[in-house]
């Protein structure tokens, strides 16, 4: 996995962890919200591999501040129910200082904690409709049949659930979620041609919604048609940037196509959105960094993998790799 010709001393050198820096982050939520909504915002800071460094909530005026100790590049994520997550990547070496901060710096010099100012703006529109919101717009009889099929799926009988969903969409050909659920089952069973037919029909019903594009990308990834998959998944990400599944599937397609820059951005986004979404996100990040001759970041990806998946079946193997490399 790593170049064998590197000496132990060289490995220790390249895998040395960069010194952590202390940073204060301040800012405000720029949206015009009432006091209770400002207080409902949650701000979480992580490194680029999803390890949490700190969190805070704004005051009644939307102002927030927190202190963290971490690497140069960090992720700030703000959450508010009903809105897509606001996500920012910060470079702590590019500190935005006010006149007062510079005056403080003359007094305290290198002892002061640098301040990074980052305002937060939530998108003007709410995020993509949830499953329950979509079902609330459908025929109640179709929803009842759909929930029965979901129960069959959750009981582990995928074939029976697929049969029920096939009957459902025949009886209710406008029932978008029925197509999505059926397509996902078919893709899980590697019945990719039929899955593509089902997802294509779903996309025609709701071209403004991301789930059909995600399904098309998933089925095409299964077929190893990564270029076609990437086209649908780019559309899904455009429609719903905070979809962890869309980012994950697009990252897989990009990696297989050798587009490591795109894969890196996707998998970093996956980890920022949901650090426990998939072990493969960390492993693929490690592979990307190895291909870029950056074993230090590869090691950090594997270490973060162990943090979030300590009971993984291959945890001992990963630990052995890290020990051999001086971690």
Image (tube, grey):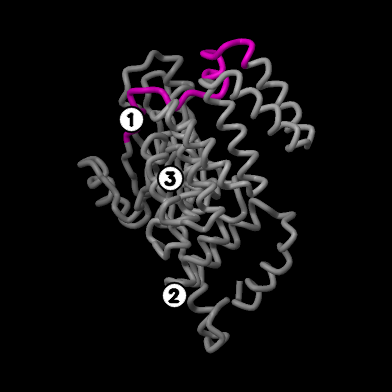
> What kind of element bears circle 3?
helix
- What is the quadrant of residue 323 in the picture? bottom right
Q: Is residue 217 visible?
A: yes
Q: Kindly identify which numbered label has been placed on residue 233.
A: 3
For the record, the magenta segment spans: 119-142
Measure how far apart labels 1 and 3 are at the Cα level.
Answer: 25 Å
Q: Quadrant of the N terminus?
A: bottom right
Q: Main secondary structure of the magenta part?
A: loop
Q: Residues within 10 Å of mark 2 (few under 14, many from 20)?
A: few
> Residue 101: image x %, image y %?
27, 44
Q: Residue at x 54, y 63 (%)?
A: 300
Q: Above or below — where is 172 with respect to 259?
A: above
Measure how far apart labels 1 and 2 are at the Cα level.
Answer: 36 Å
Residue in front for this viewpoint, 159 or 289? 159
Q: Residue at x 50, y 55 (%)?
A: 252
Q: Above or below — where is 15 with respect to 203?
A: below
Q: Is residue 244 visible?
A: no
> What kind of element bears circle 2?
loop
> Residue 130: image x %, image y %?
52, 24
Judged left or right of residue 52, residue 206 is left
**On the image, numbered disc 1 is attached to which residue?**
121
Residue in front for this viewpoint, 296 or 101? 296
Judged left or right of residue 257, residue 172 is right
Q: Kindly identify which numbered label has been placed on residue 8.
A: none
> Residue 315: image x %, image y %?
71, 62
């Amino acid at each position: 996995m790593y170049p064998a010709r590197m000496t132990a001393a060289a490995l220790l050198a390249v895998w040395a962890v960069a010194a952590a820096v202390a940073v204060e982050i301040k800012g405000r939520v720029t949206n015009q919200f009432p006091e209770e909504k400002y207080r409902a915002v949650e701000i979480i800071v992580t490194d680029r591999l999803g390890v949490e460094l700190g969190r805070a909530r704004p005051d009644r005026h939307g102002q927030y501040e927190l202190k963290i100790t971490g690497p140069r590049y960090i992720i700030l994520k703000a959450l508010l129910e009903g809105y897509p997550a606001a996500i920012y990547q910060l470079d702590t070496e590019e500190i935005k200082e006010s006149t007062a901060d510079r005056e403080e710096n003359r007094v305290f010099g290198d002892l002061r904690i640098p301040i990074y100012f980052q305002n937060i703006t939530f998108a003007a529109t709410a995020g993509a409709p949830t499953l329950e919101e979509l079902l609330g717009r459908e025929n109640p009889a179709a929803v009842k049949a759909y929930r029965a099929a979901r129960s069959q799926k959750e009981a582990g009988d995928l074939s029976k659930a697929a049969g029920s969903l096939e009957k459902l969409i025949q009886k209710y050909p406008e029932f978008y979620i029925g197509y999505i659920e059926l397509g996902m089952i078919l893709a899980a069973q590697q019945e990719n041609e039929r899955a593509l037919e089902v997802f294509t029909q779903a996309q025609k019903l709701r071209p403004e919604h991301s789930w059909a594009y995600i399904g098309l990308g998933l089925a095409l990834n299964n077929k190893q048609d990564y270029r076609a998959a990437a086209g649908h998944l780019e559309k899904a990400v455009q429609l719903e940037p905070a979809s962890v599944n869309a980012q994950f599937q697009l990252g897989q397609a990009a990696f297989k196509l050798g587009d490591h820059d795109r894969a890196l951005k996707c998998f970093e986004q996956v980890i920022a959105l949901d650090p426990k979404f998939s072990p493969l996100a960390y492993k693929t990040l490690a592979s990307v960094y190895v291909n870029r001759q950056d074993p230090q970041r590869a090691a950090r990806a594997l270490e973060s993998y162990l943090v979030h998946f300590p009971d993984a079946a291959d945890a001992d193997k990963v630990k052995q790799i890290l020990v051999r490399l001086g971690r």
